[in-house]
Image (cartoon, rainbow, N blue to C red):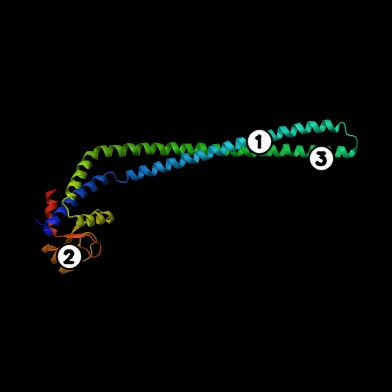
Amino acid sequence: MELTIADKLESLLKLQEIDSKLDELRKLRGDLPEEVKDLEDEVMGIEKRIGRFSAEVEDFNEEIERQKANKKDAEKLILKYKDQQMNVRNNREFDAISKELELQELEIQLADKRIREADFKIKTKQQEIEETNEKLNARKEVLEQKRKELERLVVESQEEEEKLLKQSAKQAKKVEERLLKAYTRIRGSAKNGLAVVSVDRGACGGCFNVVPPQRQADIMEKLKIIVCEHCGRILADADMIQVHRKRK
């Protein structure tokens, strides 16, 4: 037997009723899922930052070791040049060795300067690591609290949600395929999840734009599916909507 427009609207309204209950159930969780995800991303970002800081400290330590090695090499050369200076044969050789000694003294001064700079950077970076670790621990604590809160809400509502999901899937099979596709598309773009609304005081119950009198008459007669020309929602007779509200 071919379904009437009233039958089709009735199936849609039943589906809308179930899906609205699902929306209300999920709304109880509020913004918690997004908050948890944002906190997880933030914690991951802070951990990566600490990792970068630690890698920089390691680089500074390696720089210190390189400069210490350079300093030792320069000290060895100074001892060597001083020995040579004791056995020079003329002023020219003495001056040449003196220049080499000056150069190695400068190398030592430069190495000391770079060691001091690297040491200062390490202390600064370690302080940043300490402060960032404190922030990380604080954010982890908040994340753990939010996770527990979300888990509690999920556990409390999981059984009811699964029950409604099954009801929604079962009812969806009773809706004409073309209408179901339209319903799903409209619900996906509607902030309140309502794809089927009534005409209230001559206006669409979804976007509140005026519905022309002829369209209102067509909706009441239920001879065809009427959609709002402004928001695209499916328009149903107010009496049908009221009947479904009383059934809840």
Cα–Cα gap, marks 2 and 3: 100 Å
- Where does label 3 land, which residue? 99
Q: Residues within 10 Å of mark 3 (few under 14, many from 20)?
A: few
From the viewer's perspective, tell me whether residue 115 is left or right of residue 86.
left
SS under mark 3: helix
Amino acid type, callout 3: Lys
Quadrant location of residue 163? top left
Q: Could you tell which of marks 1 and 2 lies nearer the N-terminus?
A: 1
Can the viewer see residue 127?
no
Quadrant location of residue 217? bottom left
Spot occupied by residue 199 in the image (x, y as percentages of width and height): 17, 61
- Where does label 1 land, which residue? 66
Cα–Cα gap, marks 3 and 1: 24 Å
Residue in the image at 41% along x and 43% along y: 41
Cα–Cα gap, marks 1 and 2: 83 Å
- Pointer 1 with pointer 2, Cβ within 8 A: no
Quadrant location of residue 213? bottom left
Residue in the image at 81% along x and 40% along y: 99
Looking at this view, name the residue that lies furthest to the left: 1
SS under mark 2: loop
From the viewer's perspective, tell me whether residue 107 is left or right of residue 94.
left
Spot occupied by residue 62 in the image (x, y as percentages of width and height): 61, 35
SS under mark 1: helix
Q: Is residue 41 above or below residue 238?
A: above
- Where does label 2 land, which residue? 202
Q: Could you tell which of marks 3 and 1 lies nearer the N-terminus?
A: 1
Q: Residues within 10 Å of mark 1 (few under 14, many from 20)?
A: some
Mark whose residue sits in front, 2 or 3: 3
In front: 236, or 225? 225
Amino acid type, callout 1: Arg
